[in-house]
Amino acid sequence: MSGFDVKFPKLLAQLHALDLDYDDSGIDFEPYQEFQSADDNAEWIQAWTGNSALDGAEYRVFGQDGTGGYAAFWMVRKNKPVLEQPVVFFGSEGELGVVARDFNDYLWLLAAGVGPFEAVAYGPDEGEPVEALRQFAASNAAAAEKSPAAVLGAARSEFPDFEKKIRALCK
């Protein structure tokens, strides 16, 4: 299978270099140091959906929760860089949803203590702010601070059919 670049953009690499522990942050997230390979993407999306015709090329998986659910950029905006793509989550128990409109919004979600799993499984009200992530977002996000509810609301408003489209691919 043809591949794609697994190297992270600089800001994502810097974010994942932060030393954050679940016990400290409350965010169930294990960051990767590079994107999952094209072959691993194909294997994952086929297993998740039961659909052997899929190759997962529209996703760039960048981390997982403790149970193996994946956080990914969904490469849906034609000719836009990865950090301008929406962040989505595919849980190990079938949880599924759009988490943020882009990396900037994702940073503010994390700063509030809400990770990809928490956003999909529990919604915007579960997190406790994480100072290191708040400082990172304040220094690096190109957008003004947003509440978790605003981040999730904007993402779900822009991509209301994401879950329905993915469930339709399942066999």
Image (cartoon, rainbow, N blue to C red):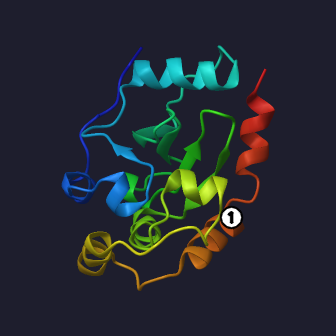
Q: Quadrant of the N terminus?
A: top left
Q: Is residue 19 visible?
A: yes
Residue located beneath label 1 in the image: 156
Q: Count the numbered circles shown.
A: 1
From the viewer's perspective, is residue 73 above or below residue 122?
above
Direction bottom: furthest residue: 144
Q: The residue under label 1 is which amino acid type?
A: Arg
Residue placed at 35% from the left, 71% from the top? 130
x, y percent for residue 32: 30, 40
x, y percent for residue 128: 46, 73
- In the image, 77 versus 156, the foreground residue is 156
- In the image, 65 versus 74, the foreground residue is 65
Q: Residues within 10 Å of mark 1 (few under 14, many from 20)?
A: some
From the viewer's perspective, is residue 121 above or below residue 56?
below
Residue 52 horizontal side relative to residue 65, left or right: right
Residue 159 found in image quarter: bottom right
Direction front: furthest residue: 23
Q: Quadrant of the C terminus?
A: top right
Residue placed at 24% from the left, 60% from the top? 11
Residue placed at 29% from the left, 34% from the top? 5
- In the image, 27 versus 61, the foreground residue is 27
x, y percent for residue 145: 43, 84
Q: Is residue 77 visible?
A: no
Residue 169 horizontal side relative to residue 133, left or right: right
Residue 162 horizontal side relative to residue 117, left or right: right
Residue 38 found in image quarter: top left
x, y percent for residue 10: 20, 55
User: Which element type, helix, strand or loop, lies under badge 1?
Assistant: helix
